[in-house]
Image (cartoon, grey):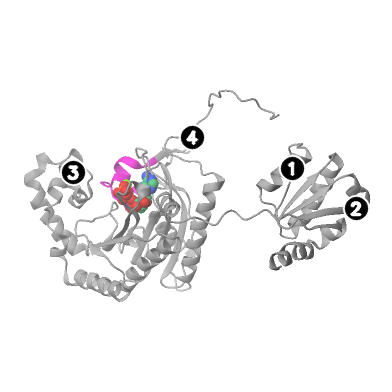
Amino acid sequence: MPFYTERKIRLKYQKPKGTADVLPDTSRLWDYVETKSRQIFDRYRFGEIRVPMFESYDLYARSSGDTSDIVTKEMYDFHDKGDRHMALRPEGTAGVVRAFVENKLYGPEYPKPYRVYYMGPMFRYERPQSGRQREFHQIGVEAFGSESPLLDTEVIQLGVDLLHAVGVHDLRLAINTLGDPATRDAYHQALVDYFAPHRAELSEDSQIRLEKNPLRILDSKDPRDKVFVKDAPSILDYLTPAAQNHFAAVKTALDGLNIDYTVDPTMVRGLDYYNHTIFEIMTSSPAFGNKELTVLAGGRYDGLVEQFGGPATPGVGFGIGLERLILLVQQAQQLPPAPDLNVYIVSLNDQAGEEALRLAHAIRNAGFTVDMDFMARKAKGQFKTANRENAQLVITLGEDELANQVASIKQMATGKQQQVPFNTVENNFQSIYQHLVEEGEQE
Ligand code: ATP
Ligand code: MG
């Protein structure tokens, strides 16, 4: 009998809107993606950085730009008990750049380019829907200190490698350039000239954007704006020679790596800090109802370190939406089943239970996985549990075993059984396992 009785439970607490519980079966998938990602980051010589999950509101507001969706609508901000205006981080780059400046990671004692990755939760106050949560997770990278278009390309290649490593193929890479400040000024004017005659027909948000940051209109999801965005002038016609060269070099390097891409001149990205190369990797999958969704997005942000009070230092990076990636991985491939349990200890009376606890501890210290009964199950129930957990070996402890200080060990696959003194179990389980399981497998 379970100690609780089945009845309708009225939940006392529910998880906050837009958050999710990740249960062990699924977190195995997370662990898989994170482990694979770390392997790739190692190969590319990116080290892990861990920065706070909240910072001053200004940090995110200034860097993302005050017309971005993140700042105008999605910030998870609050005043702390010291009346400081704080925000939960909506994205990774701002905190990493702050850390780069604060820890003087541009100093001569640090490697160049300075390359880091992060993984962790991000927070945006959005309307929860499929693929969109208020607490979600990103894996991202940032590389500081090089203007080379080869680094843009390397970062893109890293992203593609990572997605391939977790079994996600069928990717579409879209790239664009936002050029340098002179490009932006010229393009800004062109957009104002183009959109101004249609001002009244634009969404309310975009009417404000037209004043403050017309580039943002291109990123609008409002159908009223999309009509006009379609035929908006292309930034590619306003690139300065330097911006043109940078973009051309990125494309040449991508070609050299046989990475397919399409140039999407209306792509602008949701954050103000980008310049030169920006990119998104999209995929359509049954996981998203075959709609094309972005899983990876990033670009260059050459002015940001300086804006945060550091010396002028270029940077480039990307972020991956981890929830979306997990859905894709789930769709794309079957993970190997959870590893078998090495040992289950069946105890036939209370005293045997105490002995089981001791042996379990010793066997675990030898590096094996061990489980035993804590539910006062009868012998039959314990064997059933051992089977359900796919135990390779079952140790049975009853009166005889305790009297003789030996364990009866059964290899489940073959039925082979053996009596082994407790102190051998405690001191040399490795050899027992080798004998019973590994040699058994070779037979
Ligand atoms: P969108 O246009 O879909 O709102 P975005 O421009 O806000 O995307 P980024 O800030 O570039 O997205 O974030 C990078 C990635 O993080 C996105 O491509 C997506 O996979 C993921 N992401 C962003 N917001 C959320 C969210 N609320 N829930 C889950 N994943 C998200
Ligand atoms: Mg968004």
Looking at the image, is 56 positioned above or below residue 239?
above
Residue span colored magenta: 60-76
Q: Position of residue 225 (x, y in %)?
A: 16, 44
Sequence-first disc among 2 and 1: 1
Give the residue type that dot 3 points to.
Ser
Q: Position of residue 344 (x, y in %)?
A: 74, 50
Residue at mark 1: 382
Residue 97 left/right relative to 393: left
Q: Inspect the magenta stretch and tell me whether residue 67 lies in it.
A: yes
Q: Inspect the magenta stretch and tell me whether residue 226 lies in it.
A: no
| Main secondary-structure element of the magenta-colored stretch | helix
Q: Are marks 4 and 3 in contact (CB under 8 Å)?
A: no
Residue at mark 3: 206
Q: Is residue 324 visible?
A: yes
Give the spatial CA distance, label 2 vs label 3.
80 Å
- The quarter in which the C terminus is drawn is bottom right
